[in-house]
Image (spheres, helix red, strand yellow):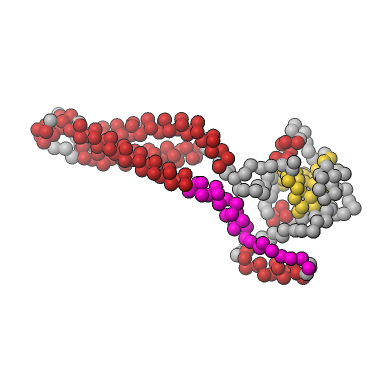
Amino acid sequence: MVGVHWVSPSWFSTMRVPLKRGRLFSETDRLGTPKVVLINEEAARQYFRGEDPIGKKVAVYQGGFHTGAEVIGIVGDVRFGTIDSTARPDVYISFGQARIPRMMIFARTAGDPTAIAASVRAGIRASAPRTPIYDVQAMSSRVASASAQARFSAILLGLFAAIALSLAVMGIYGVMSFAVAQRTREIGIRMALGAGRRRVLGLVVREGVILGGVGVAIGLAAALALTRVMRTMLFEVTTTDLATYVAMVAVLAAAALVASWIPARRAAKVDPMIALRRG
């Protein structure tokens, strides 16, 4: 099973679909000339593994191409379903070699695409007055509709991540505050023996960072194991994307540092005499 799409020679440049190998359709590919088709990269991978598809004959059971056509080029993959769907094998047939009673027209403009809708309608009516025109939308609207479910899932997961990060910060803050309260006498003795405020500050912050580092290490291991189940929800990013993991570690490290800083400042302000009396 392959997706079959009828296009004009200029469709690929309009939609910015790159040519990987071979050639695109031309105006000479018309009725009466040898039938030719283009395939996408996924079709080349699935049906011509270890072979060169260019010049090979294929049969497409639509548009009268069941008698065979020559593959003249390979183009980039296009997601015709949802934006987070995987690429599937696609075959492209030129409108010049196959007549079908329907057509979708794409127009690219440097400005607001909705501003030229009336002009496009007038142009179509002038050349095909009996053809109904419907479903006129900007590509941004179509992309938004196609990515709505993925966007909702991303927002929901982002909200859960923000809640988890807040809980982690509060947890580290609580643990460090409790540790400082329990070690008030120790901190007082250290300061009485000559430990400066900066040294006490560094001691508490270092313990908080180590605590956060252990959590980050466990979280990274769990993320590498569990993100594989989210593979279908990812778009143009892998489950082991380095930039994502670096950003995640940086955010968690900053959160641990901030959560440790307040108890550390409180510990550095401890009066040694008061601390020893309380002890």
Q: Nearer the viewer, residue 146 or 25?
A: 146
Q: Which quarter of the picture shows residue 209?
A: top left
Q: Is residue 142 above or below residue 173?
A: below
User: Viewed as shown, does residue 267 lie left or right of 88?
Assistant: left
Q: Nearer the viewer, residue 129 or 139?
A: 129
Q: Is residue 257 visible to the viewer in this orientation of the structure?
A: no
Q: Is residue 122 visible to the viewer in this orientation of the structure?
A: yes
- The magenta stretch is 130-155
Quarter of the C terminus within the rendering: top left
Tell me where residue 135 appears, x and y as whole percent.
67, 62
Who's the residue at 55% across and 49% down the image? 149
User: Viewed as shown, does residue 18 lie left or right of 190?
Assistant: right
Who's the residue at 87% across and 44% down the image? 67
Who's the residue at 79% across and 40% down the image? 54
Tell me where residue 214 appears, x and y as whole percent.
37, 30
Residue closest to the far right: 32
Who's the residue at 81% across and 48% down the image? 62
User: Viewed as shown, does residue 35 lie left or right of 39?
Assistant: right
